[in-house]
Every structure is written in structure tokens, then in C-alpha cells.
Amino acid sequence: MTEAAAYASLFVSAFLSATLLPGTSEAAFALLLNEGIGAPLWLLIAAVTGNVLGSVVNWFLGRFFAEFRDRRWFPIKETHYDRAVHWFDRYGKWSLLLAWAPIIGDPLTIVAGMLRVPFWLFLILVSIGKLARYLFILQVALIWMG
């Protein structure tokens, strides 16, 4: 695999992982680091950028399709929506720092759009949380590799 292909595939994996589609960006990131394919900094940039852009798609879904929430095709289940709204009620916009978390992360980003969280604030908080997660994975991988 070329470095360009590694960056592109990691970007796509991270993007899909941030949407409601399945993805395994953390495993892909760790594997590429372990195999020494690509520069760690560029892998980090690809992963964070793809993951944040996937969350941006979720924000736009929430922002512009909120009126269709009761439809069967809407990508977020009612229970996940209720849980995300609960997090917003309890912790406010700061809960977006957990946009990386399994189960609640993707619904949080959709709910942020539905509740009309300002885009600039959304982008900053989500980016901080996702960067912290990938930096943690990078640190663990570097320690593991020696």
C-alpha cells in the first residue's frame, strides 16, 4: 500500500466512522502506525480530518432534516436521540467533546444540529475531542511499538 493510499483509506474510514455508518478508524489508524505505513503526523491529520468532516455531515443532517425525525428512514433511533438530548440537557454544549464516544457520539452531533448549536462552536468542540482521541491512540501505539 502506498502512503497516499494509506492516508486516503484512513480518511475514508474515519469519515464513515463519524457518520452513522460502520467504520473502524481507530483500528486502521493503529494498524498503519504499527506497520510503519505513512508518517504518523499525516496519518493523524487524515484520521482527525475525516472524522471531523463525518461529524459535520451529521450536524447538517440534524440541522436541515430535523423535521423528519419521526420518519422511519431517519438515521438516528429514537432511544439514541433521547439519550443525546439528555446529555445536552445535563452537560450542555460541552458534551460535544464526547462526539468520539461509541453509541452516544454520532447522535450527539446530529442533536447538536437539531438544537442549532452554532457551527463554529460545534466544529471547535468536536475537533478537540476527536483530536484528543487520536492523539491518545497515537501515544499508545508509539509506546507499544517501543
Image (cartoon, helix red, strand yellow):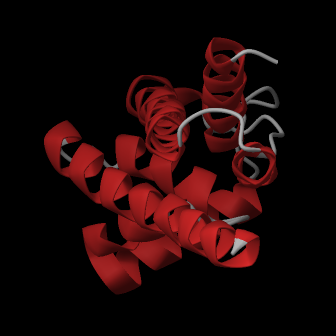
**Residue at the front extreme of this rendering:** 146
Q: Position of residue 102 (x, y in %)?
A: 71, 65
Query: For this view, does 124 lie left or right of residue 15?
Result: left
Residue drawn at point x = 80 percent, y = 40 percent: 23
Which residue is situated farthest in the bottom direction here?
90
- The number of callouts visible is 0
Q: Foreground: 89 or 51?
A: 51
Q: Is residue 96 above or below residue 49?
A: below
Q: Nearer the viewer, residue 34 or 78?
A: 34
Q: Residue 27: horizontal and vertical position, in percent?
A: 81, 53
Query: In the picture, which quadrant includes the N terminus?
Result: top right
Residue at 34% over, 82% down: 91
- Front-most of residues 130 and 63: 130
Question: Residue 56 occupies which quadrant of the picture?
Answer: top left
Name the residue nearer the viewer: 96 or 87: 96
Q: Position of residue 70 (x, y in %)?
A: 68, 38
Where is residue 77 drawn, in percent x and y? 76, 50
Q: Residue at x 62, y 68 (%)?
A: 142
Quarter of the rendering occupied by the C terminus:
bottom right
| Residue 69 shown left or right of residue 40 in the figure | right
Residue 109's place in the image compared with 134, above or below, is above
* Residue found at x 21% / y 38%: 119
| In the depicted structure, whether residue 56 falls above or below residue 131 | above
Would you place residue 16 above or below residue 18 in this image? above
Q: Quadrant of residue 43?
A: top right
